[in-house]
Image: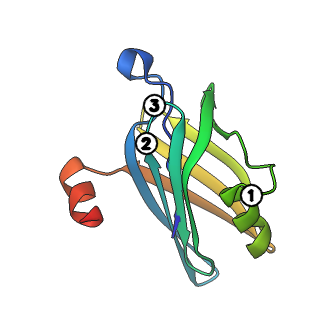
């Protein structure tokens, strides 16, 4: 399960993602689940499950247009940096579509390109999943 939680700038209420987003992808018979939880205007939780398991909370981020930029992804000692490196996974892009209220994660695992479209979870479902 890959879950990236990110809190985007919420000025005006519609500038970026908010809440929880979950999606799945199946590539070459392997299932992957991604989850992003926006915790604040500047932190997100990211989760990925499948062939690898990644859990990184309180990752600093900012929005650059529609791009969700993870600020510490290139720094040794950062959870996401170290975990991606450990499993030889590369985050290619993470983008927010305000019209669809979705976050799309593109990652490369070994030679496999994985695109996970994460849709917003309903509040009741989100509460049930975290309880």
Question: Residue at 81% across / 49% down in the picture?
Answer: 74
Q: Nearer the viewer, residue 28 or 18?
A: 18
Residue identifier under label 1: 81
Q: CA distance from mark 2 to mark 3?
A: 18 Å
Q: Is residue 67 visible?
A: no
| Total numbered circles | 3
Residue identifier under label 2: 39
Q: Earlier in the sequence, mark 2 or mark 3?
A: 2
User: Horizontal and vertical percent for residue 122?
Assistant: 25, 49
Q: Which mark is residue 18?
A: none
User: Horizontal and vertical percent for residue 57?
Assistant: 53, 55
Crowdedness near tag 2: few (<14), some (14–19) or many (≥20) residues, C-alpha within 10 Å: many
Residue identifier under label 3: 98
Crowdedness near tag 3: few (<14), some (14–19) or many (≥20) residues, C-alpha within 10 Å: few
Q: Earlier in the sequence, mark 3 or mark 1?
A: 1
Viewer-side label of 2, 3: 2
Colour mode? rainbow
Q: CA distance from mark 3 to mark 1?
A: 27 Å
Question: Residue at 43% across / 17% down in the picture?
Answer: 11
Viewer-side label of 3, 1: 1
Left or right side of 76 for 7: left
Helix or strand or loop: what does disc 1 sit on?
helix
């Amino acid at each position: 399960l890959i879950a990236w939680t990110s809190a985007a700038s919420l000025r005006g209420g519609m500038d970026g993602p908010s809440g929880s987003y979950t999606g799945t992808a199946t590539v070459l018979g392997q299932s992957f689940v991604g989850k992003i939880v926006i915790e604040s205007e500047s932190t997100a939780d990211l989760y990925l499950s499948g062939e690898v398991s990644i859990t990184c909370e309180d990752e600093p981020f900012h929005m650059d247009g529609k791009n969700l930029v993870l600020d510490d992804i290139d720094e040794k000692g950062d959870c996401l940096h170290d975990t991606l490196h450990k499993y030889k996974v590369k985050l290619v892009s993470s983008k927010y579509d305000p019209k669809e209220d979705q976050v799309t994660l593109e990652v490369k695992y070994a030679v496999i390109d994985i695109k996970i479209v994460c849709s917003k979870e309903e509040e009741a479902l989100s509460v049930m999943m975290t309880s």
